[in-house]
Image (cartoon, coloured by chain):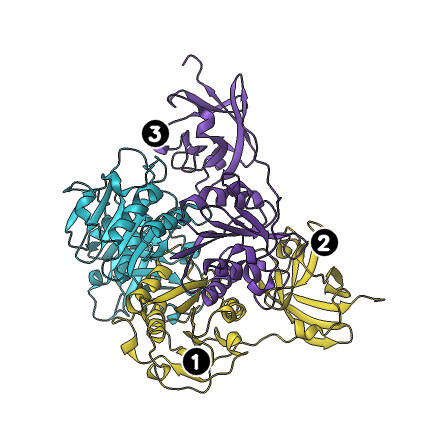
Chain colours: A purple, B cyan, C yellow
């Protein structure tokens, strides 16, 4: 079985995603299409990049990951295909793929220029349907990536906000708010370098928010807690509630983690 | 073909459901995954239980139904697998499966303890991906349920609010509000025991809401009507409108059905 | 591979669409079901008709397109099946299919009356599950459309609002607002009849909104622009924003296109 995933900001209220799947079904009937998400906020390349980076590694070998958050569609921005030892990525060259690629060995990156793999009529407003869907279908059918277009050596990379080590602890920021209102930070497990996790506390400026615990319900209903979330990053949650809503967290909010005084 | 259904509160805005499908695709490539819904309100176990109970019976034999509304993920709550003569159920042992199971003969209930059927690394925040998805894939592949863990004899059951027969008629309550704003009650067709349905009226306290009719547009646009809904329960609707919004109905609102005076 | 598409107003918050797929999976296990959309506004037949008309042509030969926006379910309204040289359509006879059919040669239209192809128990509130899903599965399995019911010669057609040619230019209206807030008009490429598109401007009454350009980002962020959208109609957008929200456009809003003065 050959898997194609889709990560877009097209939403599901219209027919856009459906027509991408129709194009794929016509060209690669055996491919199984899996939605990663279509509810990336419109034009939010960083949110799309994070979703793709958090999700792609759970798919089988040779999966073709298509991502389309593409406010510049129809402009001079390039479209690219990337091959790694494990899988393929397709998307506009606007940084959307870059956080997923940061952890991968890159075999080749190609610009999508060979119109033989596009729909016969390509417009300037919906490359998801006219270019990315058919190219994904062809890759899934075994078309070699070299046929899609010329090799390029550089592509757009989004900055990943750094985690700073200070005398007072780690300083990072919120990088994604999920459906539950959990605030996922850029502080990953490796940065923590702690023997146990019971002694770590999260601050918003001078305001202590919560301690790191092992799971959401380690605190009473309605209380804040930090956990190591399912993507490997520290996330701030409110048990049975929305941390973003109750604590006023949003993407970019600075957070600090320190050892508890006296611990 | 082997079917796996998913009923969760994960929403579709993030990559959570997609990664569950990626895990399944890697382990059981032949399985077809069907979303029952992912928009159960966050943490609302009763709403998830109702959705599963209303939907599961329309799937073929041997379907594996996975339900994950799991605010206690990572705590000591158990995870269970259930086999009935027709199908399988997987979920946290928090009552989520219990309304579907109430109408089924139970062959065996097992706790999920055999980590050989989990992902290699199991966290404490996303058992949908780390435990339920891979176990569903293995069941779909033919793994016998006995291998998943020890048998248990009791599991958490949600109360089903009773329908009371009184001299004035039937007393029940709203149990679910659907996407159209229709208010589904716990009063089922069997409880009605009526020769025809033309003579039944629905009251909210002393306020008469509507009569029972055969279909939504039996009343003019904007008027309230009760029908026997597609899951076999009396539901209160507003033709071309939202009954919940216009009549102030919510889950738990008490309703009463009586024969019309003089009929 | 045999494709069945679904276009409904059922939303994805409940189990409705899932049970349609369960019914199809039981009867036509080889069929691949693709969602066109389930988020047609409740009861909005025109929005559903536009979505289907915009999307269906991107699917392979012999696809069965099922559309259910059906406020009159259970009433005397008919249900129909349509065969064209390329595909099949199923839906209530309320105009929902008519904009898609307007561009097709019709081979036959049948009313769905043969209950042998329905679920054994058909209610009066959810024909998507009880009638349309099983009939779609049977068509997908190769059942001939003639077996579904008698031929009819007329069916309900929705009016398509006309585009008027006046001395001042073209007068049309907004026919659909998409997820991005783009306002899609009824003015299609053929009506424009222009050598280049640089000289066309869009007016709302006397207020000039924008010029026609080749792609969304042809204007700076936050500015209005008209483009020829992916369905072949002129659409009004705001670069990185919502045209509907910022310009106060809604379905039915009259728009006018003229050549720029002096061009």
Which of disc 1 and disc 2 is earlier in sequence?
1
Relative placement, left or right, of C195 versus C66 is right
User: Are there few (<14), some (14-19), or many (20+) residues within 10 Å of tag 2?
Assistant: some
Task: From the image, tell me which residue sits under label 3.
Answer: A218
Image quarter (top left, top right, bottom left or bottom right) of the N terminus of chain C: bottom left
The quadrant in which residue B217 appears is bottom left
The reply to whether label 3 and label 2 mark residues of one chain is: no
Image quarter (top left, top right, bottom left or bottom right) of the C terminus of chain C: bottom right
The quadrant in which residue C147 appears is bottom left
Task: From the image, tell me which residue sits under label 2.
Answer: C219
Q: Residue at x 36, y 75 (%)?
A: C139
Which subunit holds the residue at mark 1? C
Give the Cα separation between the discs numbered 3 and 1: 59 Å
Of residues A33 and A262, which is closer to you in this image? Answer: A33
Relative placement, left or right, of A109 versus A179 is right
Q: Position of residue A204 (x, y in %)?
A: 52, 26
> Disc 2 on helix, strand or loop?
loop
Of residues A19 and C246, which is closer to you in this image? Answer: A19
Q: Taking the image as drawn, is residue C159 in sight?
A: yes
Of residues B27 and B163, which is closer to you in this image? Answer: B27
Of residues C231 and A63, which is closer to you in this image? Answer: A63
User: Are there few (<14), some (14-19), or many (20+) residues within 10 Å of tag 3?
Assistant: some
Query: Mark 3 or mark 2, which is nearer to you?
Result: 2
> Disc 1 on helix, strand or loop?
strand
Q: Residue at x 68, y 75 (%)?
A: C191
Q: Position of residue A159 (x, y in %)?
A: 59, 37
Label drawn at residue A177: none
Give the Cα separation between the discs numbered 2 and 1: 44 Å
Task: From the image, tell me which residue sits under label 1.
Answer: C83
Q: Position of residue B45 (x, y in %)?
A: 31, 45
């Amino acid at each position: 079985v050959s898997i194609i995933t889709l990560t877009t900001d097209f939403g599901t209220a219209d027919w856009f995603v459906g027509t991408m799947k129709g194009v794929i079904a016509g060209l690669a009937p055996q491919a199984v299409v899996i939605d990663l998400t279509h509810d990336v906020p419109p034009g939010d390349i960083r949110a799309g990049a994070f979703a793709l980076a958090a999700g792609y590694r759970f798919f089988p070998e040779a999966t073709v990951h298509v991502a389309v958050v593409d406010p510049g569609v129809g402009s001079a921005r390039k479209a690219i295909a990337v091959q790694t030892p494990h899988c393929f990525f397709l998307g506009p060259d606007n940084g959307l793929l870059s956080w997923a690629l940061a952890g991968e060995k890159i075999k080749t990156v190609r610009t999508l220029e060979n119109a033989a793999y596009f729909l016969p009529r390509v417009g300037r407003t919906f490359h998801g349907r006219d270019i990315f869907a058919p190219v994904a279908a062809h890759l899934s059918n075994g078309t070699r990536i070299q046929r899609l277009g010329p090799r390029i050596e550089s592509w757009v990379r989004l900055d990943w906000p750094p985690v700073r080590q200070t005398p007072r602890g780690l300083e990072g920021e919120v990088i994604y708010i999920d459906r539950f209102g959990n605030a996922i930070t850029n502080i990953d497990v490796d940065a923590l370098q702690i023997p146990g996790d019971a002694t770590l506390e999260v601050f918003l400026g001078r305001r202590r928010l919560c301690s790191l615990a092992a799971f959401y319900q380690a605190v009473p209903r309605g209380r804040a807690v930090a956990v190591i979330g399912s993507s490997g990053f520290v996330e701030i949650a409110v048990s049975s509630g929305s941390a973003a809503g109750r604590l006023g967290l949003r993407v970019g909010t600075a957070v600090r983690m320190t050892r508890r005084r006296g611990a």
